[in-house]
Image (spheres, rainbow, N blue to C red):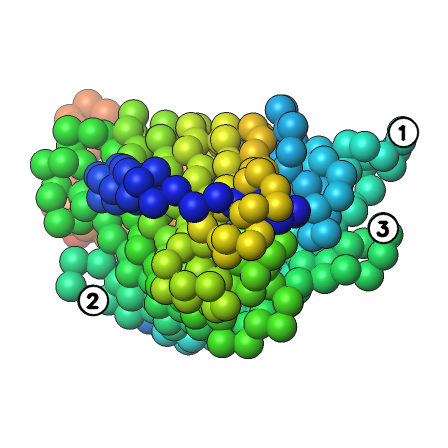
Amino acid sequence: MSTQRGPAPRWWALTAAGISVLLSTSPDALALDKQGSAHGGDVSGADSGFDVTGSASLGVALYNPTYAARPDNTGHTLFRYVGHADIDLIGQRLSIPIDVNLFTDRDRHGGGKLIPSELDLIGGVTTTWGLGPGAIEFGVRAETDRNVDRGNYSQTYVDARTRYLYSLADQFPELGRALDGNVTGAATLGAFVVNPTYAARPDNSGLALLRYALHGEMAFLHSHAAVGLDGTMFTDRHHHPVAPSELDLTPELIARFDPFEVHLAYERDMPVSEPPGITATHTPHVQHFVYVLASWSFDAYSPPAASAAPASTESPPDDALPAPSARPPAGDIPPAPSATSPADDVLPTPSGPDDSTPR
């Protein structure tokens, strides 16, 4: 990333207001946030037991004029390979989320376009508890983003964050019925507690201090289709540490047929404010692209589907046999005894069936 971001207070205020309105009515999308919500943002989940859930994704940039393929802002992203896992040690009360992101550079030649140019590794610990109409997640994670194919540039940090998750259909069933889906979302507040190198803007200037995020999704058509919006903001510890220095905005369309999802998204990462000395030297540096991301979700310990009970092969109970007083109708002749079994074993006695009556 370079060093560009001009202050735009009025533009920022309008943008922030717009995001707040949109996300208050929609909530949970799979944008390019490389550190996703644990358990996909589920509001409810098991509070005990061991489980491993996650997803594998493949993305491709359809249009990319400026989105970099490495943390040092070189190249242009072409492919994205993603793996995510949640290891639940005590249900969602204690979980270990793990994320792996790989990007490739379309500017490389031939098969080099398929070989990773950037590797991002993220791991941490989270705990999720029901609170009011939703759930609250507390987590600590460490991330390192580094060049893979050239140089040794990297960005690293440890952050702590709180995320509130909600599902409106759980509180307003009539809304779920009207949409044939749901409105879900999350609001996040995070702090970079250890940050030697993670930038506060797309041009790699500054050092990130705070993270504000709103995430929304409105699902319909039996939740097979959805629209989502994701907004993430960072602040700069060295310049107005509470005011946003960067805004990443991602609207998307989603098709979902469990366990598969396809996302068509546009991401735009842009500066919001920066020191006047930097602003005077360049125009704002913006990274944006359009991409498609296909995902497959899994649950390694989901119980097997119950199979249909096999037809019974047992003989009917005694009470299903003719009553002891039943006798063949008049004129009927009992069958002749088998040559291999004595007649007494087959024919009933006048007083009823004996112990050897077939069942």
- Disc 1 residue crowd, few under 14, some 14–19, many 20+, Cα 10 Å: few
Q: CA distance from mark 2 to mark 3?
A: 45 Å
Q: Nearer the viewer, residue 207 or 307?
A: 207
Give the residue type at disc 3. Answer: Asp
Q: Residue at x 49, y 76 (%)?
A: 193
Q: Which residue is mark 3?
A: 149
Label 3 element class: loop
Q: Residue at x 37, y 59 (%)?
A: 243
Q: Which residue is mark 1?
A: 110
Circles 1 and 2: CB atoms closer than 8 Å: no
Q: Name the spot of residue 161 as percent of width and height, x first.
A: 40, 68
Disc number lying in front (2 or 3):
3
Left or right, 353 with respect to 77, comes to left
As drawn, the label of residue 131 is 2
Label 1 element class: helix
Q: Work out whether 309 lies above or below 47.
A: above
Q: Name the spot of residue 94 as percent of width and height, x first.
A: 42, 75
- Disc 3 residue crowd, few under 14, some 14–19, many 20+, Cα 10 Å: some
Q: Nearer the viewer, residue 27 or 340?
A: 27
